[in-house]
Image: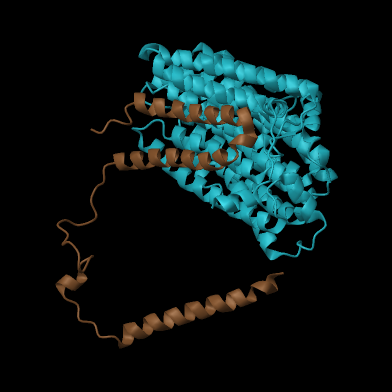
Amino acid sequence: MTAVLLASLPAHVSYPFSQALSDLTQIAPIAWVTLTLLLCVLADLILPRHRRGTAVASMAVAGLVVSLGFAVWFWYRGDGHGAYAGYVTGDRFAVFFEMLFAVLGILVVLVSHAYLRRRGMLESEFHVLTLAGIVGMMTLGAATSLVTVFLGLELLSVAFYVTCGFAREETTAQEAAAKYLLVGGFASAFVLYGMALVYGAAGSTLLPVISQRLAHAGVLGNPLLSLGVILLGVGFAFKVSGVPFHQWTPDVYQGAPLPVTAFMSVGTKAAAFAMIIRVFVQALPSMTVEWQVLLAVVSAASMIVGNLMAIVQTSVKRLLAYSGIAQAGYVLIGVVAGGRAGLGAVLFYLFAYLFFNFGAFAILTVLVRPDGEHDDLGDLDGLGYRHPVLGVMMSIFMLSLAGFPPLAGFFGKFFLFSAGIAAGWTWLVVIAVLASVVSVSYYLRVLLHVWTPETAGKRLFVRAGPVAAVAVSAVLAVLFGIYPALLYGAGLFGAAPIPGR
Amino acid sequence: MLASYVPLLIFALIVLGLVGALITLSFVLGPTKPYRSKLLPYESGVIPTTPARQRLSVRFYLTAMLFIVFDVETIFFYPWAVFLHQLGWYGVIEMFVFIAILAVALAHIWRKGGLEWE
């Protein structure tokens, strides 16, 4: 055994400290969140019970702010490169997603702190799991090897399997956790099988090497490679909840606690798109025709089914789940279109979507009572009259999701659709435009309930943390709509490290 | 490229056909005279006192999972030990970081009562 091991490894390994430091710098935002996570676990053990929750929440926020600082610094330096023998990278694409997930993590902790206290749930462990999910998502953005991609995918999935069932006594939460575990396991198996076949064809797990080897080798007629791409596509479609692999989404979103739903609807989706771009666009440009057709079909189906199913929902969480399925369809147009314009549009949309979709879920926390969440459309009745500020912010989120100018959602769709047209995917964009016209009806239906003239109703649960998170989201959703060039420019820079077609 | 797999396919078909034929033949032709002691799970072993489908304490899973975590840790040690001289002090530090992360997890389990057998 040892002899085999020695023979398969290089005779002399040398890894000086300077190299170690340089490698660690490239993943500093990820490493810092990991360190914060470990310190949070220790703080949870040491501190007295009544102070744990608040202390761990503040530590998590502080750690994420520092991580965001690292990411912003690296973004401006812009000299990130591969590290750890090419397994991860600190290029602008990775840093873009590290900034996105650090911001998302801060918002999630802000919302969940008040929510968990209200529901009387264990708090510190929840924040630790949130941080674990963030580490997994950041890893997916930075991964440049199939191994690292899978590592990030599992890290984020395992964190969500646990947090989905955090309301342990509720049967819906148990259903959500079990369903997500089984479906997530299936998706991971598909991805892993696909990776194995791609590795078999290319002989390497490093994404740039795969791209190089498949570019000029006689492997392109290999049906096993095509099968691998299809299996990867199926697994990715599960993760972005694209039709026909979306059935788990409404049930899991409804059963999971609100902060988890908000986190998952934005975070898993963004991380899965980072993974799709890394694996399909960066590693498999020679298989473009195969995955383009696959993703285009999933995109069209998601936009049609998601928007039609959302119309008949009565629970706001389920409505937003179906809307999320449709939104995944829009974003897939950008991936299918490809090029810098397409990928830049994807990054723009994911970052803007973070704010308006997260905000829409986060606002529902004001309806939470100790006995559970009250997220039926009827529960929203008169929200705009009982609390005008929240009503206005909910209107911003809904109109942005529907794609009204001058909000961020409008420019997101504009960039995605124009990239689609420029790349010649007119039929897909026609479906997208028709579908988003349909979507206006159910987003406005939510607003009809919000602005029903009615002031009676249960007291709202308004706390500083969630309201701050919602307000930040609303302000940025408007800001990126009025001044989209800022974020679109960042999106184009973020897409630059991915080799264009 | 796939043509090189054809012998493997033929081999698989032969194996499946042969095994299938043998099982079918022995099922059809063989005499069956079942009696009680022949149907026991262990025909010549200890006679079972209870059915095998019982509720199992969940702690067994916990122990098994803990075992796997530290088992994997041990497996990581072997290649590390082989290359220790070449990795130098960096290798030592790195491995202690790895152990420290696992130790945090162990402390968490311990403090939360995961190791108590009650």
Q: Is residue A256 above or below residue B51?
A: above
Residue B63 or A386: which is nearer the viewer?
B63
Looking at the image, can residue A259 be seen?
Answer: no
The quarter of the picture where residue B36 lies is bottom left
Q: Position of residue A420 (x, y in %)?
A: 79, 44
The residue lying furthest to the front in this view is B85
Q: How is the image coloured?
A: by chain
- Quarter residue A165 falls in: top left
Residue at (58, 52) in percent of width and height: A3
The colour assigned to chain A within the rendered structure: cyan
- The chain coloured brown is B
In this rendering, position of residue A281 left or right of residue A304: right
**Along the viewing direction, whichever of A122 and A386 lies nearer the viewer:** A122
Residue A84 shows up from this direction = yes
Residue occupying image coordinates x 56% and y 35%: A320
Q: How far from the left and from the top, in percent, is residue A428? A: 74, 49
**Is residue B98 found left or right of B66 in the rendered image?**
right
Could you tell me how many numbered marks the image carries?
Answer: 0
Residue A63, given in percent of the width and then of the height, sits at: 58, 18
Residue found 76% across the figure and 35% down from its top = A345
